[in-house]
Amino acid sequence: MSISKRIGRFALQDPGEGDGDAVHFCSTCAFGEICLPGGYDKQTLQELHFLVEHVGPFHAGDHIFHTGEKFESIFAVRAGTVKTSLIDEEGREQVLGFHLPGEMVGLNAIHPARYPCDAIALDTVYLCRFSFPALAVLATRMPGIQQQLFRLLSADIGKAALLAGDYNANERMAAFLIVLADRFAARGFSATSFRLSMPRGDIANHLRLAAETVSRVLRRFQDQGLIRVEERDIELLQPGQLRQLARCILHD
């Protein structure tokens, strides 16, 4: 069976009104952790629900926001992948990160009150948009929302610092794959089979490697039996060995 058939769960569909019900928010909701386990049900969280505006679709290359625009909203990815990046004075792009379903975009704009980077759709993207001023007011009355915002901010900072050290190409790529796998697994998706929606050049830029190096390391991992690659589809055959290879980055 091909990888693409095994990861059919990732085939993009218009999420419409989401897969939630009268009690739960949709499975990719960035605030899902504060539902029943956190002491709230959906009916209690109606005020939060009313803040949500479903936006999209955005298509590959579309900007969700631009560097320097006034910060008014944060976004939760419902479907697709969003890239955040900066363009320097010489016109060179620096890829800051990739945001998957269930993850927030725009949290790094809270302090400067302007978006400090571009957010760009890598494929067909649907989002939930939250008015941040209204969300902040609501968070003062509902501690669970405030705590989840703090957790999301902390996770965002952690992802940004993950690959800042002096690591070699094998360690960086192994860490990138394992972190992606863990992020997919946290939302109930497969932790071993997934699609790399980002181009190799963007991965290389993010990892501070040459594009040729990324392709070479992926081939090496495949030759070693660590992964299977079919175009952009990846299967982790030996996730334990990849995690061991990335241990200095992941601090496992």
Image (cartoon, grey):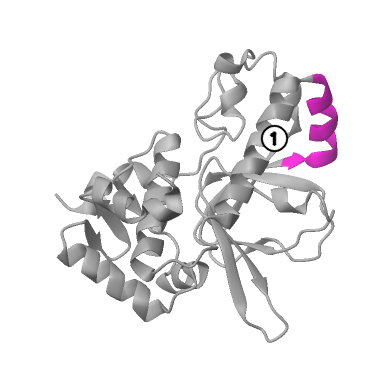
137 drawn magenta: yes
Q: Residue at x 53, y 19 (%)?
A: 21
Q: Residue at x 82, y 34 (%)?
A: 136
Horizontal relation, residue 29 to residue 9: left or right: right
Residue 49 visible within the image:
no
Name the residue nearer the viewer: 25 or 170: 170
- Tell me where residue 62 appears, x and y as whole percent: 61, 64
- Which image quadrant is residue 8 in? top left
- Tell me where residue 132 appears, x and y as whole percent: 80, 40
| Residue, disc 1 | 149
Q: Residue at x 55, y 63 (%)?
A: 164
Horizontal relation, residue 159 to residue 212: left or right: right
Which region of the structure is painted magenta?
Answer: 130-141
Tell me: residue 103, above or below residue 63.
above
Quadrant of the snapshot with the C terminus = top left
Crowd around label 1: few <14 · some 14–19 · many ≥20 (10 Å): some
Q: Most prominent secondary structure in the magenta stretch?
A: helix
Q: Residue at x 41, y 54 (%)?
A: 248
| Number of numbered discs on residues | 1
Horizontal relation, residue 188 to residue 154: left or right: left
- Tell me where residue 84 appears, x and y as whole percent: 61, 61
Which kind of residue does numbered mark 1 sit on? Answer: Leu
Tell me: residue 149, above or below residue 23.
below
Residue 99 visible within the image:
yes
36 drawn magenta: no
Name the residue nearer the viewer: 70 or 204: 204
- Tell me where residue 105 appears, x and y as whole percent: 65, 50
- Which image quadrant is residue 118 in? bottom right
Horizontal relation, residue 226 to residue 46: left or right: left
